[in-house]
Amino acid sequence: NHPSLPKKFIEFEVGTHDDLAKFQHFTDEMSEILKKNLHLKNILSIKIQKQFMIDFCAIDFETATHERNSACEMGICVVENGEIVKTQTWLIKPPSFPYFHPRNIDVHGIVPEDVQDAPTFEDIWHEAENLMYGNLMIAHNAAFDAGVLRSCLEYYGFFKPKMEYLCSIQI
């Protein structure tokens, strides 16, 4: 946790009829926080105040093209006992470099020049894997993010572990 960066506090009580809606709101807000701040490379601390804690990692990918293995940015936020313990983002040089589809650039704003000196997914995977290991994965539109992860692992010849994930859209 970095003291000079903003903190976002999200509170909800367990046992009320709207827990699910509040958890949906929490995961949506976390996804938006990650998306807005990946490009800034800020570390945000989110404190979840509730009666029970769930450990998970929130994950978000951006891609250069329609190809799922074209990750150009990855962000991970690890939450343990309701506290963010680590937030990490990487700009990634995708296999398609220097080609980025204009539609993808319109979505995330990342251009080839941003990643020209960035590591490849192969270079950052072991660090990312250590953050994710054993954690439930949560993502907004998790099928997309899990698909990007699987495709990148396959492209670089890494073992594809069985992933357990929740999609905040479906919660």
Image (cartoon, rainbow, N blue to C red):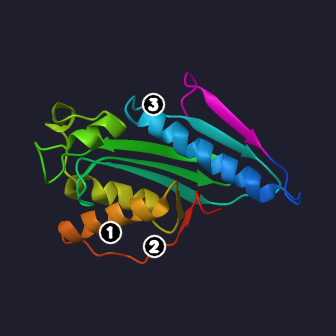
Residue 3: tell me if it is visible.
yes
Binning the other alpha carbons within 10 Å of mark 2 as few (below 14), some (14 to 19) or many (20 upward) gives: some
Residue beneath disc 2: 163
Residue 83 spot, x, y in % from top left: 65, 47
Residue beneath disc 1: 150
Residue 165 spot, x, y in % from top left: 52, 67
Q: Secondary structure at mark 1?
A: helix
Residue 82: tell me if it is visible.
no
Residue positioned most to the right = 16
Of callouts 2 and 3, which one flags the residue occurring earlier in the amino acid sequence?
3
Q: Secondary structure at mark 3?
A: loop
Residue beneath disc 3: 42
Q: Nearer the viewer, residue 102 or 163?
A: 102
**Quarter of the rendering occupied by the C terminus:** bottom right
Q: CA distance from mark 1 to mark 2?
A: 9 Å
Judge left or right: residue 26 versus residue 61: right
Q: Amino acid at mark 1?
A: Arg
Residues at badges 1 and 2 in contact (C-beta under 8 Å)?
A: yes
